[in-house]
Image (cartoon, rainbow, N blue to C red):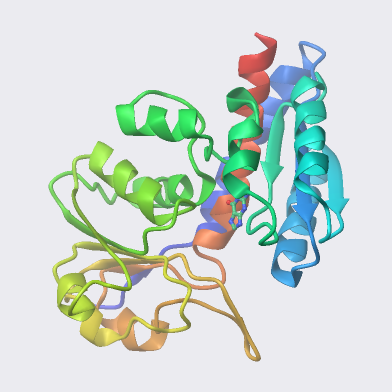
């Protein structure tokens, strides 16, 4: 049977409608939600993400505060900017785009952002809240994956979920979110022996490894749900970590790249910004 293609654009549009309702709710109380985006350096991928985030803000009626800093920016300067944004009542969400240039301390930057303004869900307090099962801002990409599963009626409860990749941005929080929903979770990474065999155990396979088309048919059990978090820039455009054409015929459902997880990350970021504004102006 042909797989269901999980349409991230359509679900992102639905999330945006909810966000627009949130913007209207805040407006009725005289509040305009604001998101500050901090980009250090000229990484082209990061520049295009940040530009798209700013467009999303404009479309939804969220004020965006754009801070593009030179690659040579020093830690003290970045810290001072984060402190100013933390203190600014017009800024409800702060996103420091990763990766930062190597000479900067990402741990310092992430921990410096006020936890209530941490729309990325990366602050140690918010990751701790996720670990403890408490509400709080959740990392946009894995939270977007959970929303996609929910929208397509894919219940992780009792399923075997395999996450490939253990980054703090995706893999680790993804595993915790699937566990919170009662999946049996395995997190794999570059040192996992016989990765294809491990992945073939999965009812739900989430791939976030950053290697173009690494996952072929031999990684996928017949009838699995495959979620491709990869966004690799190649000469032929954006390509995922999953070899879609090879894998799709085996799947019950699969996310395409582009048009799968990507649009969800930004939609959840906007939704997290509204939630942050609501918490801060209650
Ligand atoms: N770089 C890649 N994805 C993300 C994200 O979700 N948030 C931030 N801050 N940086 C990223």
Vertical relation: 142 (above or below) 122? below
Residue 229: x percent and y percent? 46, 65
- Rendered view: 199 above or below 36: below
Q: Position of residue 217 (x, y in %)?
A: 26, 85
Which residue is at a point 22% across and 86% down the rendered structure image? 218
- Compared across the picture, whether 96 is left or right of 39 comes to left
Asked where in the image residue 177 lies, by quadrant, the reply is: top left
Q: Quadrant of the C terminus?
A: top right
Q: Residue at x 68, y 42 (%)?
A: 95
Which one is nearer the viewer's eye here, 113 or 157? 113
59 sits to left or right of 168: right
Q: Is residue 58 left or right of residue 276?
A: right
On the image, the x and y values in percent for residue 260 come to 50, 64
Is residue 61 in view from this perspective? no
Residue occupying image coordinates x 68% and y 22%: 277
Question: Can residue 3 be seen here?
Answer: yes
Percent across and percent down for residue 210 are 48, 73
- Residue in the foreground of this view, choosing between 31 and 22: 31
**Which residue is at a point 16% across and 53% down the rendered structure image?**
159
Quarter of the figure with the N terminus: bottom left
Total marks in image: 0
Depth check, front residue: 28 or 68: 68
């Amino acid at each position: 049977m042909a797989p269901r293609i999980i349409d991230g654009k359509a679900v992102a549009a639905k999330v945006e409608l909810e966000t627009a309702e949130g913007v209207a709710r805040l407006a009725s109380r005289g509040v305009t939600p604001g998101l500050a985006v901090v980009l250090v350096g000229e990484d082209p991928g990061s520049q295009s993400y940040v530009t798209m985030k700013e467009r999303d803000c404009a479309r939804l009626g969220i004020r965006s505060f754009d801070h593009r800093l030179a690659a040579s920016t020093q830690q003290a300067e970045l810290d001072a900017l984060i402190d100013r944004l933390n203190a600014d009542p017009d800024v409800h969400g702060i996103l420091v785009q990763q990766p930062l240039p190597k000479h900067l301390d990402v741990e310092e930057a992430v921990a410096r952002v006020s936890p209530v303004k941490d729309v990325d869900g990366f602050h140690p307090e918010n990751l701790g809240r996720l670990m403890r099962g408490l509400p709080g801002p959740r990392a946009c990409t894995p939270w977007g994956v959970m929303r996609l599963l929910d929208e397509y009626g894919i219940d992780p409860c009792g399923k075997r979920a395999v996450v490939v990749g253990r980054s703090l941005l995706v893999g680790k929080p993804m595993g915790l979110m699937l566990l919170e929903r009662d999946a049996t979770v395995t997190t794999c990474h570059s040192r996992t022996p016989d990765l294809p065999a491990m992945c073939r155990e999965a009812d739900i396979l989430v791939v976030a490894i950053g290697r173009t088309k690494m996952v072929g048919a031999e990684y996928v059990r017949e009838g699995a749900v495959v979620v491709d978090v990869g966004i690799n820039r190649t000469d032929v455009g954006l390509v995922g970590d999953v070899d879609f054409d090879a894998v799709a015929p085996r799947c019950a459902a699969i996310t395409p790249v582009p048009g799968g997880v990507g649009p969800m990350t930004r939609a959840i970021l906007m939704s997290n910004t509204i939630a942050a504004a609501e918490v801060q102006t209650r």
